[in-house]
């Protein structure tokens, strides 16, 4: 594609982009929600989620080494399933999960920013601030890769360093109590195995940013080596950061307090530790993290949707707009994210994104196992393990949500059915291409 610039993203810039998406969504938006399901075991839930994501990353690493592409997952799906319904459906699930992630982070930005003011936690200003962030991300993405690369690197350093300072101070203030990470006795209360497994769905969502790296594979320097390196390094950085921050929070807040402030739990943990200055510091980190997370995510998903358009797998209309398809996609992405930010709360946004992502991930692994394994020299045992882990976690999460929020399940599976049928209708309107698989 002429709009993509080869070698425009360095290894460091790509790592910054990947960690920006993961840390922005993960530790700020999801920590309290993971704690709500897993109780005092939520630091462990983040680590186990990282391990499961590592199994998933194996398939992406193998595919990215064989087929580095600016289209990333869209191209991988095409290699496995052809230019047909399965490819279009799974790619759109990934696309919408990324857009959902942007609205999740946007609302998190609003929730943390309001901690600086005397505003109720359900204030209308939360979606207003979120919408403002999405518009800012749009403007920055219009500016191009160089601006994104420079801002990503600076923000990654600031927020990761800030989070480590927060975690170090919190752990030090609590006396380095390692037992906080591994509670003894019955701390789960009414929680059962399904709740713990369900929590993993949200913790996995905290790591899904590694997939955005594959969407920019054609733009990373030496992609055959550096895409997989970027994924591995980003996962390790985020896993360590999540562990330390979770340790700091659990050492200074009990689970009811974390759940009560689940949309801004890090800010709440900073109050008793560092006073007003600590609150300002933590909110500043959250603002940096969420801004950079949205910018990086919008960057990646716009490339993926442009690729799907070029592959003629999704419809496209200019609506009178000038410029490239990528710029048009930026407009569509931001509009959808704004709608979600206004009408959905953090919990439902996160849950919807987790379901979409896990379904797409299973489709990816199945394609690798049944159609690409020999071509990319993937080990069947690892791929099968990734599928089993995804199915168990997704099933547990859906079971929990059926009990607690059945409306969400109707929305999730109803919308997936609409996407599937809509794609089938669109593809049936044009002559099938050679190699398409339905």
Image (cartoon, rainbow, N blue to C red):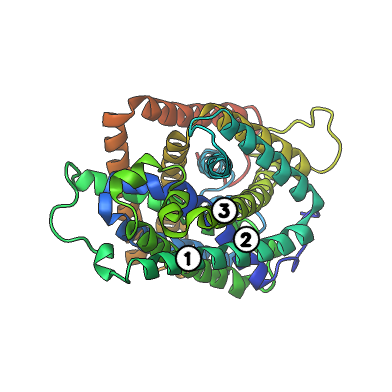
Give the mark, 1 or 2, whose residue is nearer the N terminus: 2
Observer-nearest residue: 430 or 349?
A: 349
> Counting other residues with Cα less than 10 Å from the Cα at mark 3, is it few (<14), some (14-19), or many (20 or more)?
some
Residue 91 location (% of width, % of height): 55, 44
Are the residues tagged 2 and 3 within 8 Å (C-beta)? Answer: no
Are the residues tagged 1 and 2 within 8 Å (C-beta)? Answer: no
- Identify the element where label 3 is drawn: helix
Q: Is residue 121 above or below residue 12?
A: above
Q: Mark 1 and mark 3: span between their CA atoms?
A: 28 Å
Instruction: Please state which of the two labelled residues, at mark 2 or mark 3, is closer to the viewer.
Output: 3
Q: Mark 1 and mark 2: span between their CA atoms?
A: 12 Å
Residue 313 location (% of width, % of height): 63, 39
**Residue at horizontal 27%, vertical 43%?**
396
Q: Is residue 29 above or below residue 399?
A: below
Relative placement, left or right, of 265 versus 42 is right
Q: Which residue is label 1 attached to?
A: 235
Please tell me the numbered disc located at residue 17: 2
Observer-nearest residue: 33 or 126?
A: 126
Observer-nearest residue: 315 or 4?
A: 4
Q: Is residue 279 above or below residue 165?
A: above
Observer-nearest residue: 175 or 291?
A: 175
Give the mark, 1 or 3, whose residue is nearer the N terminus: 1
> Counting other residues with Cα less than 10 Å from the Cα at mark 2, is it few (<14), some (14-19), or many (20 or more)?
many
Outermost residue on the front side: it is 275
Residue 410 location (% of width, % of height): 39, 25
Q: Mark 2 and mark 3: span between their CA atoms?
A: 25 Å
- Identify the element where label 1 is drawn: helix
Q: Which residue is label 3 attached to?
A: 280
- Identify the element where label 2 is drawn: helix
Residue 421 location (% of width, % of height): 51, 27
């Amino acid at each position: 594609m002429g709009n993509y610039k080869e070698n425009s993203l360095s290894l460091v810039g790509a790592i910054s982009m990947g960690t920006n998406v993961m840390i922005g969504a993960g530790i700020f938006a999801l920590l309290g929600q993971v704690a709500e399901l897993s109780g005092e075991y939520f630091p462990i839930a983040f680590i186990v989620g990282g391990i499961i994501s590592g199994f998933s990353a194996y398939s992406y690493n193998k595919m990215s080494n064989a087929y580095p592409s600016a289209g990333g997952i869209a191209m991988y799906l095409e290699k496995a399933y052809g230019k047909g319904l399965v490819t279009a459906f799974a790619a759109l699930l990934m696309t919408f999960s990324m857009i959902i992630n942007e609205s999740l982070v946007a609302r998190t930005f609003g929730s943390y920013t309001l901690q600086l003011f005397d505003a109720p936690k359900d204030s209308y200003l939360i979606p207003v601030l979120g919408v403002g962030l999405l518009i800012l991300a749009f403007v920055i993405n219009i500016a191009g890769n160089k601006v994104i690369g420079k801002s990503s690197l600076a923000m990654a350093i600031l927020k990761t360093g800030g989070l480590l300072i927060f975690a170090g101070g919190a752990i030090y203030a609590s006396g380095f109590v390692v037992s906080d990470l591994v509670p003894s006795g019955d701390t789960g209360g009414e929680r059962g195995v399904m709740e713990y497994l369900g929590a993993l769905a949200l913790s996995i969502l905290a790591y899904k940013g590694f997939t955005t790296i594959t969407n920019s594979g054609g733009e990373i320097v030496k992609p055959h080596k550096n895409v997989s390196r970027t994924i591995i390094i980003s996962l390790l950085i985020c896993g360590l950061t999540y562990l330390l921050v979770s340790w700091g929070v659990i050492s200074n807040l009990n689970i009811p307090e974390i759940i009560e402030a689940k949309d801004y739990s890090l800010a709440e943990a900073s109050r008793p530790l560092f006073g007003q200055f600590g609150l300002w510091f933590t909110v500043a980190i959250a603002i940096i993290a969420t801004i950079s997370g949205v910018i990086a995510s919008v960057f990646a998903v716009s490339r993926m949707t442009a690729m799907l358009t070029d592959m003629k797998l999704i419809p496209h209309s200019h609506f009178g707009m000038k410029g490239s398809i990528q710029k048009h996609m930026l407009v569509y992405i931001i509009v959808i994210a704004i709608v979600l930010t206004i009408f959905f709360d953090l919990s439902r946004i996160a849950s919807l994104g987790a379901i979409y992502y896990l379904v797409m991930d299973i489709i990816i692994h199945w394609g690798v196992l049944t159609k690409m394994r020999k071509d990319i020299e993937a080990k069947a045992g690892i791929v099968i393990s990734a599928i089993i882990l995804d199915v168990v976690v997704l099933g547990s999460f859906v079971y929990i949500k059926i009990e607690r929020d059945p409306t969400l399940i109707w929305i999730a599976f109803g919308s997936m059915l609409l996407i599937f049928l809509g794609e089938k209708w669109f593809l049936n309107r044009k002559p099938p291409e050679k190699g398409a698989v339905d």
